[in-house]
């Protein structure tokens, strides 16, 4: 930030704008009046406005400030419209960084977390957000996660939570499970040891039971960005296909595959199964090469994205399948690109029409047989790549000449009739693995009994709380929890048993916090009857990075809670706003050994010469630094701006104003120090404008409406309502940047007029305009508006002042008659609003039938407008 403009409050006149004292004063008033306490009031329409809660990492960053300012502006606006607004805040407080801090600094995770929360709560309060702090939710507190555990035991009894083996990252040196973030280039972050994949039993939630509903109800979410819904649809990944049974030659057990392209069945030239497919193990036992391959796959990539790009490998198993439609024998391979977790863990290889299969076939010399061609009968051209389009069948016996859908249906029917296949719907979505082998998370409330198996902890023994630790080594494993915690008795048989030590994925906590806010202090369950009063959330605001997982899990939990009878709506978030990233320039130096060091823009001076060429130097040593352009503010690029520094320097209102003015909420925001200073200067002008005329305004008649005003005052009034009209529309569209621009325009206009000389009607026009200005700016810069409102001695708090109404009468400007000339000859007269813009005048002139008659067939070369008098069209 450029330090060009020192703020010397003390030296300023008494009247000058001092944001620190203004903001303290407004905040004290809100606090004393408990202004943001929400109550369930059946008489008023509720409005639940929610911003995604932060992880308490230490202090707020600009992304938070942007998110929370947007939410606060919407909340305050809705409140002025008369709605009963709930806007809560809380902490997504479990997670890995607290464990890392514990390891590095030897502070207990709880202490570190709660200290961070205190700092960040203070920052949020300093920003003046209208939160009901009585509803604060902290997910790491047993009062919160108790109910998560309670809910999990119910899901378990319903069969919606279950245990199965799944792969984890195992650090063989630290002897601990690693989170994905702790694996760097395949090695443990602390030990540097090569990470192994291990299979251990873990807990899953059956989100797949809700896949169809999660997909279908996206259509109801008309208040969501299309892009987010598309991402969710793709993630759920519904596909329609056929499960086909291929008999195995010489009497082995048959092989089932899932395909979305049964129309290509005559083009199958190999089969491929996953390394974990049950067909492989017996072969591996007698064939060491296959055994080695299976072992190699076990260590390889696991994600679907990896599968797309990785090198396709495989080995023939020496078995053959039989094509159920033409009896051909087909070799069965094991392939590293087949996922055991999708479909049946086996695929039919059609190299002619699937690129992946094509590459595999090329590599291993398998035949490529085309069976689908373009509708015009031309050659599909499979020499360079597979032909993946849907087309018309050939080389397919009795199914020749059928188009895709006809062929799909005919082949599916035939297979079904022969008992060789079945139509099936498949989802890409997998069940949600919620187990984490971490300490700083919600303990999974299960007791593992050697006799009864996993048994849920009874309600009256909840919450299950881990013993406090002051020091964590590399992570949590059983040995680090005390014996006395681990050892327990089985609630069912009373025999000796052990507690589960896994904790929940922190996405579990964030999947229902929005519901808990509605029922603070509830001691009977996750929520009580108050939940139905507030839910669903009317407006949710957060980052696009949560488009898939968090939002999908929260939707899932909402439906789970509905089916448990806790709430009675289908979807949690009616409208969703995804705010854009905050960007800033990135500066760096590359040292001789190729290492890159980043410098914060605050430490860099940028100079431009006369030609506009920029040079950037590090302020401390004067040496040049390179710019890597603009990028998301991040720790790794050291290009963040600390909101606290700005608040200390300019106050919260300036930060809020800049945030809203710099760009519309959904777009990226380029950081700009000059614009921040400009926002401050605007508030100072607003302050002076109102202060300088405060007594005049306070004593003026309330409304100038309906009175005969002189033309200049009338014009100001018209513009005021014109601007208000735009502002109202822009608030509804969440275009806060143009709201601010319009307010600046109005301020400029009001500054130009000499009000002290204007008499009573002038004072009344000013009073109306300033009232409107303070009201519409209040959601954005609530502190300064509150204090100025008070200064004007207006009745009631500004918070609950009614939103101003546009006076339609004031919008109508007087009309004038203008002469229209065509090529200098007078041809018609038109009536237009006085002061109408040139474009409007031109349009009105061209719409006149007599003018049209003279313009016909020619083009308008020029249009000269003498305002309010004459318009001359030059045609030819
Ligand atoms: C033959 C075929 C021919 C295929 C063709 C595609 C194109 P979606 O749409 O995502 O459901 N597949 C099935 N199970 C698989 C597994 N376990 N691992 C890897 N791939 C698998 O994709 C379905 C398609 O993905 C299936 O259709 C199958 O390849 C492949 F010209 O079968 B197809
Ligand atoms: Zn038991």
Image (cartoon, rainbow, N blue to C red):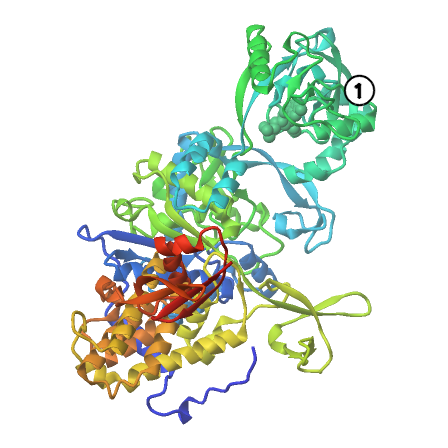
Nearer the observer, 611 or 102: 611
Residue 503 is left or right of residue 712, and the answer is right
User: Which image quarter: residue 329?
Assistant: top right
Work out whether residue 345 can be spotted: no
Residue 460 location, x and y as percent?
34, 42
Q: Nearer the viewer, residue 373 or 713?
A: 713
Provide the residue designation for mark 1.
367
Task: Check disc 1: other Cα within 10 Å, few if <14, some if 14-19, many if 20+.
Answer: some
How many numbered discs, if any?
1
Question: Compared to 498, does 173 lie above or below?
Answer: below
Q: Name which residue lies at 68% across and 29% down.
A: 338
Q: Is residue 728 left or right of residue 552?
A: left
Residue drawn 58% across the image and 8% down it? 414
How far across and how far down the image is residue 834, in percent? Answer: 31, 69
**Depth check: 535 or 801 in front?**
801
In the displayed structure image, the side of residue 421 where residue 327 appears, left or right: right
């Amino acid at each position: 930030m450029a330090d060009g403009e020192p703020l010397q409050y003390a030296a300023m006149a008494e009247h000058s704008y001092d944001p620190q004292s203004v903001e303290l004063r407004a905040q004290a008033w809100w606090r004393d009046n408990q202004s943001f306490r929400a109550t369930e009031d059946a008489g008023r329409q509720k409005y639940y406005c929610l911003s995604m809660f932060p992880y308490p990492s230490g202090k707020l960053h600009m992304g938070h400030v942007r998110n929370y300012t947007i939410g606060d502006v919407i909340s305050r606006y809705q409140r002025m419209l008369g709605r009963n607004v709930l806007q809560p805040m809380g902490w997504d407080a479990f997670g890995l960084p607290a464990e890392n801090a514990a390891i590095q600094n030897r502070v207990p995770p709880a202490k570190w977390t709660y200290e961070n929360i205190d700092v960040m709560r203070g920052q949020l309060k300093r920003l003046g957000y209208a939160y009901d702090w009585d509803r604060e939710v902290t997910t790491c507190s047993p009062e919160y996660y108790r109910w998560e555990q309670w809910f999990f035991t119910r899901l378990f009894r319903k069969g919606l939570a279950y245990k199965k083996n799944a792969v984890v990252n195992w650090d063989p040196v630290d002897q601990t499970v690693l989170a994905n973030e702790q694996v760097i280039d395949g090695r443990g972050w602390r030990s540097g040891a090569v990470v192994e994949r291990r299979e251990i039993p873990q807990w899953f939630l059956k989100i797949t039971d809700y896949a169809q509903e999660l997909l279908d109800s996206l259509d109801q979410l008309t208040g969501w960005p299309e892009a987010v819904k598309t991402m969710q649809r793709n993630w759920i990944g519904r596909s329609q296909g056929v499960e086909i049974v291929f008999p195995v030659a010489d009497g082995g057990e048959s092989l089932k595959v899932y395909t979305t392209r049964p129309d290509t069945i005559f083009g199958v030239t190999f089969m491929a199964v996953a390394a974990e497919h049950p067909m492989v193990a017996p072969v591996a036992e007698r064939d060491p090469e296959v055994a080695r391959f299976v072992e190699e796959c076990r260590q390889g990539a696991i994600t679907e994205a990896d599968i797309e790009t990785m090198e396709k490998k495989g080995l023939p198993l020496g078995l053959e399948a039989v094509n159920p439609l033409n009896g051909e024998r087909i070799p069965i391979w094991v392939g590293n690109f087949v996922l055991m977790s999708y479909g049946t863990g086996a695929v039919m290889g059609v190299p002619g029409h699937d690129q992946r299969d094509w590459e595999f076939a090329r590599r291993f010399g398998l035949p490529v047989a085309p069976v689908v061609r373009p509708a015009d009968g031309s050659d599909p051209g499979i020499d360079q790549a597979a032909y993946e389009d849907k087309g018309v069948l050939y080389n397919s016996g009795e199914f020749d000449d059928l188009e895709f859908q006809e062929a799909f249906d005919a082949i599916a029917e035939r297979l079904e009739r022969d008992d060789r296949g079945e139509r099936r719907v498949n989802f890409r979505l997998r069940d949600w693995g919620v187990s984490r082998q971490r300490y700083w998370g919600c303990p999974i409330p299960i007791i593992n009994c050697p006799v009864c198996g996993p048994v849920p902890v009874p309600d009256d023994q909840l919450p299950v709380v881990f013993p406090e630790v002051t020091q964590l080594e590399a992570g949590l494993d059983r040995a680090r929890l005390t014996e006395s915690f681990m050892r327990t008795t089985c609630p069912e048989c009373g025999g000796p048993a052990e507690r589960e030590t896994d904790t929940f994925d922190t996405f579990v906590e964030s999947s229902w916090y929005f519901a808990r806010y509605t029922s603070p202090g509830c001691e009977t369950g996750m929520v009580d009857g108050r939940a139905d009063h507030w839910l669903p959330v009317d407006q949710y605001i957060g980052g696009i990075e949560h488009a898939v997982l968090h939002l999908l899990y929260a939707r899932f939990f909402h439906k789970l809670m509905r089916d448990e009878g806790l709430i009675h709506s289908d979807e949690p978030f009616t409208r969703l706003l995804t705010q854009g990233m905050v960007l800033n320039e990135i500066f760096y130096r590359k040292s001789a050994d190729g290492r890159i060091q980043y410098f914060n823009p605050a430490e860099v001076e940028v100079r431009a010469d006369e030609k506009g060429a920029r040079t950037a130097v590090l302020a401390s040593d004067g040496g040049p630094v390179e710019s890597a352009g603009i990028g998301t503010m991040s720790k790794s690029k050291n290009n963040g701006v600390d909101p606290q520094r700005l608040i200390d320097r300019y106050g919260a209102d300036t930060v809020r104003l800049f945030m809203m003015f710099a760009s519309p909420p959904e777009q990226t925001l380029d950081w700009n120090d000059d614009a921040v200073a400009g926002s401050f200067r605007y508030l100072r002008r607003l302050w002076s404008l109102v202060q300088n005329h405060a007594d005049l305004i306070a004593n003026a008649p309330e409304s100038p409406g309906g009175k005969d005003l002189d033309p200049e005052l009338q014009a100001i009034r018209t513009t005021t309502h014109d601007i208000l009209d735009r502002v109202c529309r822009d608030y509804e569209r969440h275009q806060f940047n143009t709201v601010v621009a319009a307010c600046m325009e109005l301020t400029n206009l009001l500054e130009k007029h000499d009000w002290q000389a204007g008499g009573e009607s002038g004072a009344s026009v000013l009073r109306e305009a300033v009232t409107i200005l303070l009201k519409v700016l209040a959601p954005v810069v609530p502190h300064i508006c509150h204090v100025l409102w008070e200064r004007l001695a207006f009745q009631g708090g500004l918070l609950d002042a009614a939103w101003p109404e546009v006076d339609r009468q004031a919008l109508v400007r007087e009309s004038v008659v203008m002469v229209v000339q065509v090529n200098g000859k007078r041809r018609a007269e038109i009536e237009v609003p006085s002061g109408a813009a040139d474009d409007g005048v031109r349009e009105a002139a061209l719409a006149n039938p007599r003018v049209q008659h003279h313009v016909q067939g020619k083009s308008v070369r020029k249009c000269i407008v003498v305002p309010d008098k004459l318009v001359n069209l030059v045609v030819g």
